[in-house]
Amino acid sequence: MTSRTASPPDSQRVSALIDDPSFNTEPISDKISAYYSLVFPNFTYFLQTLNVTIGRRCIPTSTASSSEQTQVDVDLGPLKSVSRLHARIEYEEEEERFVLVVLGRNGAWVDGAWCGKGNKVPLGER
């Protein structure tokens, strides 16, 4: 996962310019209103809120209510190495930056470095 950011002044959205050559989709506007973009091999996710959850969606069961099922904003697919609630990206107002909080027991790779559960990693500009 690679990331790009723009610090939100006074919690207002900023424009993120799409310039990644691997970003291949139907024609869209050159600008998307987002705080941050997460670039994955097969898709790009644009953060449009200050808190985003990342993980895998579990297969719904007939016995569990939908409120008991973990809901994530960014679904990384069905791999068992990805926790249902794998990570969270949040904005720290005091530091004026986004951070990734690792929640999954298997840890996460962030910008080429492995981070264990409980780590809070600042996300830099790209």
Image (cartoon, rainbow, N blue to C red):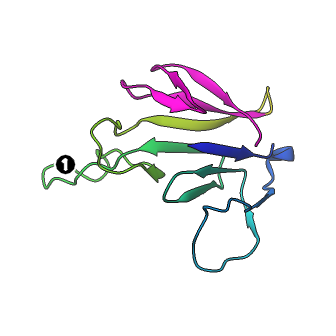
Q: Quadrant of residue 20?
A: bottom right
Residue ranking furthest to the bottom:
27
**Where does label 1 land, which residue?**
64
Is 107 inside the magenta-drawn segment?
Answer: yes
Q: Which residue is most to the right?
A: 9
Query: Which of 121 and 9 lies nearest the eye of the viewer?
Result: 121
On screen, residue 70 versus residue 12, left or right, reads left
The x, y position of residue 5, in whole percent, is: 74, 45
Give x and y (percent) for residue 41.
51, 53
- Residue 23 locus on image (x, y percent): 61, 64
Picture mark count:
1
Image quarter hosting the N terminus:
top right
Q: How many neighbours does mark 1 have within 10 angstroms: few (below 14), some (14-19), or many (20 or more)?
A: few
Of 42 and 57, nearer the camera is 42
Q: Secondary structure at mark 1?
A: loop
Decide if residue 115 is on the left or right side of residue 105: right
Going 33% across and 50% down the picture, which residue do you hit?
57
In the picture shown, does residue 100 fall above or below 2?
above
Q: In the picture provided, is 126 more to the left or to the right than 113?
A: right
State the residue in front, 50 or 41.
Answer: 41
> Residue 81 lies in magenta, yes or no?
no
Q: Quadrant of the C terminus?
A: top right
The magenta region covers 97-126
In the image, what residue occupies the spot 79% across and 26% down? 94
Judge left or right: residue 121 versus residue 80. right
Q: Residue furthest left?
A: 63
List x then y, in percent, for residue 56: 36, 46
Residue located farthest toward the front when viewing the structure as drawn: 21
Q: Residue at x 50, y 43 (%)?
A: 53
